[in-house]
Every structure is written in C-alpha cells, then in structure tokens.
Amino acid sequence: MSTHAPHTAQPVTLPATLDEAVAALAAQPAAVPVAGGTDLMGSVNGGLLRPTALVGLGRVAELRGWEYRDGHALLGACLTLARMGRPDFAVLMPALAAAARSAGPPQILNAGTLGGNVITGAPSGDTLPVLAALEAELVVAGPDGARREVPVSELLVGREHLRPGELLAYARVPLLHAPQTFLKATGRTGPGRAVASVAVALDPARREVRCAVGAIAQVPLRPLEAEAWIASLVDWDGARTVPPEALAAFGDYVATACIPDPEPDPATGEVAALSAGLLQLRRTVAALARRGLGRALS
C-alpha cells in the first residue's frame, strides 16, 4: 500500500462488472473504490487515509470506454485522461480533451481517470470546469441495478452525496458540436497544478456562451451574468463574432464576478483594496477568459 511505512494487509475485491462492484461496496460499507489511484494512493502514503478494504475497478470494462447515446457522450468513470486526450475524442469534446492532456505527466495521464477527478473534487482538477461549463450529469449506480442522474455541479458543491453502496459509473456530457476551449495558468513551465483555469463552450442551438472558472475556489464558478451579457452580443446568425472591445470586457466581467471586491466595512463603509496576489489572480482569470472566448469565436 505504501513505500513510506508498513501497513496491515487490506482485503482487495476485483469485480468484473459494474453490478459486482456495487455489490462489493454494499457488502463492505467501509471499502474504498480505486481505479487509477493517483489521488487515493497519495492520501494513503501521506497518512491521510487508511482504508479497511479496497474495491478495484480495473477489470470493469464497461467503465473504461465511452459511447454515443441520445445526443450525448456517455463517458465511463474509469476512462483514463490519456484516452480522453486522443484525436477521436478531441473532435467531439475538444475542451475536455485539452483539459485531460494538461493534467500532468504521462504516468498521471495513463493512470488518472475522469471519475477519480470528479470524486476527489480537488479545486485544481482540470476536467471539472469543463464538465461544469458543458453542464454534464453524473450517472450513479446503486444496489439492485438502481441508477440515478446527478448534475455535476450538485455533487461538487455537496448538495448531493454518494449513498452507501453507490458508485459513480458514468458522466453524461452533451455533444454541442460547437467550438470549446480550455486554458489554464500554472506556477511553472510545463504540466503542473492549475493556478487558474477557464473553460468556454458555445451552444449555438440555445444561443448561449457557457464559461466556468476552475482552481480559484473549492468548486468551479459559473459567471452567469457575464455569460448572458456576451451571448447577447454574439452574431449567432452570421460569423459568430463580437466587437473586439467586448472580448476584453468579457474577461474583466468574468474575473470580477469570480474574484469580487471586498465587502464594505460595516462600521466605516470603506472598501479595502484587494491584495496584490488576488489582483494578479484576477488579471490571470481575465486573460484566460478573454483568450478562451476569442479562440472559440474564431
């Protein structure tokens, strides 16, 4: 289990089907499901988690692929980041493919999974703002063949929780057949943890621009007013363009919505200035949103 300290052996169950995996979790409520293990094993090795049992999902073939269904892509929770980065996947979901490719070095991409990214829910999870912008839904499998759908935003903010014996099985992502972008800023050159990230998706059928900002808060943020404002300026029936100055204004609108000015002091009414770090982060978000929208519209 760990290279840092000895541990007692944990029982490991290796189901071959989704229903077997759910049954194993129902039979062992304290068991922890594991796929790629890139986050789980880090917690184990760091002494933050001591699972009494593991349910390995590596043999559940139905969770490792993806398929078309009713205008959506049904993505298995064990779909690896490396697989999502391939050209055939990128044609239909370019922003999700870009996010997967940027998640880390090859060893992380080959092991890390979409479901692990969602369940861990780390603020810097690269796929999370894309799933939020695309308004994906999660399919949760439960005992006795039960299935239920949960909006990804509700699981991430904690309004929904997995119940005993339940397992995240799929992500159901709408296929918009329109430009999408994902950009992120890191603290160093090359693959790294995001300081800020922005996903932008166009939905011509609904004449919507969707945007989600990741890494700057515990969950991805949707600047809904900024989305509605810029969508009203897009020439949907023509070249899908906006005035150049609108791009810059959109970036500032998104950044200010996600990193607002401090509230006035109740006693004096004075508003404190943002710290230098937050001002820089706001500028970073504005630049990512401006570039992301500009690339989507071009």
Image (spheres, helix red, strand yellow):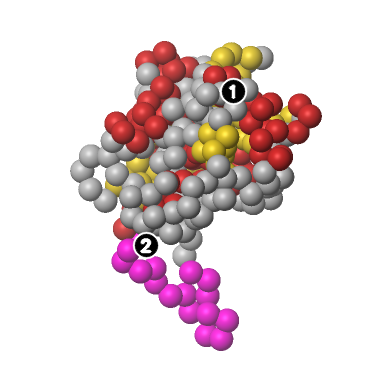
Please name the residue shown 29% across and 44% down the image.
192
Element on which disc 2 rests: helix
Residue 202 is a magenta residue: no
The picture places residue 271, in percent across and down from the top left corner, at 47, 75
Q: Magenta-highlighted stretch: main secondary structure?
A: loop
**Highlighted magenta segment, given as a residue range:** 262-279
The picture places residue 201, in percent across and down from the top left corner, at 49, 30
The kind of residue on which mark 1 rests is: Ala
The kind of residue on which mark 2 rests is: Leu
Residue that mark 2 sits on: 278
Residue that mark 1 sits on: 16
Q: Residue furthest front?
A: 8
Please name the residue shown 20% across and 43% down the image.
189
User: Quick one: label 2 or label 1, which is nearer the N terminus?
Assistant: 1
Is residue 59 visible in this depiction of the protein? yes
Closer-to-camera residue (47/39): 47
* Circle 2/circle 1 CB separation < 8 Å: no
Q: Residues within 10 Å of mark 2 (few under 14, many from 20)?
A: some
Please name the residue shown 44% across and 35% down the image.
36
CA separation in Å, label 2 and label 1: 48 Å
The picture places residue 158, in percent across and down from the top left corner, at 64, 51
